[in-house]
Image: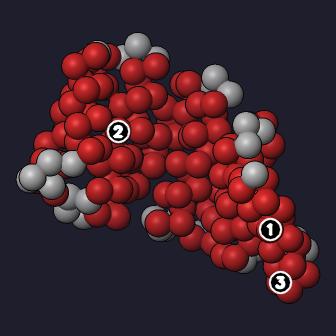
Amino acid sequence: GKHEEAYDHFVQCYEMRKKLYGAGSVHPKLAQSLGGIGVLLTHLGRHEEALLHDEKALAMQRELDAGKDSRAMHHCIGSLAVSLYNLGRRKEAATRCREALDMKRRLCGGRDDINLSIAIINYATTLESARELNEALKLLGEAEAMLGRLFPGGDDLRGSVLGKIGVI
């Protein structure tokens, strides 16, 4: 229902933006639209198509950011990692998750951040699937400690991380 409808709207938005900014042009709104389409295709289980959109969005965002870190770039890398993971390309997904994590660490500048903890968890999950359990446990411990500092009274995400640590 809703994802299919949202997908249709995102495609319409992308087509409108292509007309507005010019087909073949590089623009933040076009990269954003491509990324959004990729996310929705993932939700719809259309992983090969999602991967293509994620790759296009990332290439455009890299051109826009000209080698600089950005939240938009981090999002594109993370979405690409999810698509690779869903296609069973776990080593490539782990590489992209590591790239996203490294970027998020730079963007956060040493500060605790909920999105940094999620990037850590995502990378740990890809390592776990690759059976690199010691490194995954180390990262999950880091994420749990960060979430403990961010939410001293407890948090559902922190509880999930503790559960994951217990299972590994």
Residue 156, image x, y percentages:
27, 44
> Label 3, on which residue?
21
Residue 147, image x, y percentages:
19, 49
SS for tag 3? helix
The image shows residue 75, relative to residue 165, as above or below, that is below
Q: Amino acid at mark 3?
A: Tyr
Residue 39, image x, y percentages:
66, 52
Alpha carbon separation for disc pair 3 and 2: 37 Å
**In the picture, which quadrant includes the C terminus?**
top left
Going from N to C along the chain, the mark reached first, 3 or 2, is: 3
- Residue 34: tell me if it is visible: no
Q: Amino acid at mark 1?
A: His
Q: Nearer the viewer, mark 1 or mark 3?
A: 1
Q: 155 left or right of 103?
A: left
Q: Residue sitting at 46 percent across and 45 percent down? A: 99
Going from N to C along the chain, the mark reached first, 2 or 1, is: 1
Name the disc covering residue 9, or none.
1
The image shows residue 156, relative to residue 6, as above or below, that is above
Q: Residue sitting at 74 percent across and 62 percent down? A: 6
Q: Pointer 3: residues within 10 angstroms few (<14), some, or many (20+)?
A: few
Name the disc covering residue 44, or none.
none
Q: Pointer 1: residues within 10 angstroms few (<14), some, or many (20+)?
A: few
Q: Quadrant of residue 46?
A: top right
> Label 2, on which residue?
121
Q: Amino acid at mark 2?
A: Ile
Residue 103, image x, y percentages:
40, 55
- Residue 138: tell me if it is visible: yes
